[in-house]
Image: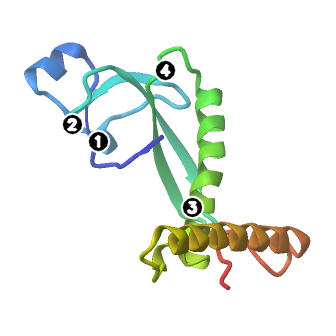
Amino acid sequence: MACKSNRKVSLSEEDKKQGGSQRIDTIDFPEEKLVKGWIAGVDFPVLIFRQVFKNKDGSKGILYLVCSDLECDADALKAIHKKRWKVEVFHKTLKSNAAMAKSPSHTVLTQSDHLFMSIYSAFRLEVLASSHPETLALGTRRL
């Protein structure tokens, strides 16, 4: 999963025990390599990967990916995050475009109806977007 750049990280178990942690964005990561580390507040080691990419506007973006599977490699970690990001976009669609969070209902039946219709409308919006990709760009859809 992605991690914020202000999270505190220790790169050795001794540093973690002594409380010697630093912000993740101040650490010099090797290019395309996974680094074993300990995140503050987490009792077990994790793998940390810094992914550098270019945004559409030409600016540079940095994403810090964290994985608790110590046997994972960089390609698998990037693939997992790519799949997970699609779920995040779907949740954004449900919340923003399908008005899932704006339910005026108070009973179980009306809440479940609103939930079903929100999911259905998000599905229909995705079908519409896939049939007209030139007019509806992913992540910018509005009902």
- Residue type at the position of mark 1: Thr
Quadrant occupied by the C terminus: bottom right
| Secondary element at image label 3 | helix
Q: CA distance from mark 4 to mark 2?
A: 22 Å
Q: Nearer the viewer, mark 1 or mark 4?
A: 4
Q: Amino acid at mark 4?
A: Asp
Spatial CA distance of label 1 from label 4 is 24 Å
Which tag, 1 or 4, sits closer to the chain's start?
A: 1
From the image, tell me which residue sits under label 1. Answer: 26
Residue found at x 13% / y 27%: 20
User: Could you say which disc has been placed on residue 39 in the image?
Assistant: none
**Residue underneath mark 4:** 69
**Residue found at x 42% / y 76%:** 106
C-alpha separation, residue under disc 2 versus residue under disc 1: 7 Å
Q: Quadrant of residue 104?
A: bottom left
Are the two marked residues, 2 and 1, in contact with CB atoms closer than 8 angstroms? yes
Position of 91 with respect to 17 (left or right) is right
Left or right, 46 with respect to 139, comes to left
Q: CA distance from mark 1 to mark 3?
A: 31 Å
Q: Residues within 10 Å of mark 1 (few under 14, many from 20)?
A: few
The amino acid type found where label 3 is placed reads His
Amino acid type assigned to the residue bearing label 2 in the image:
Gln
Asked if one can make out residue 66 in the rendered structure from this viewpoint, the answer is: yes
In the image, what residue occupies the spot 59% across and 27% down? 74
Q: Nearer the viewer, mark 4 or mark 2?
A: 4
The label nearer to you, 3 versus 4, is: 3
| Residue at mark 2 | 22
Residue 91: which disc? 3
99 vs 40, nearest the viewer: 99
32 to 62, vertically: above or below: above
Please state which of the two labelled residues, at mark 3 or mark 2, is closer to the viewer: 3
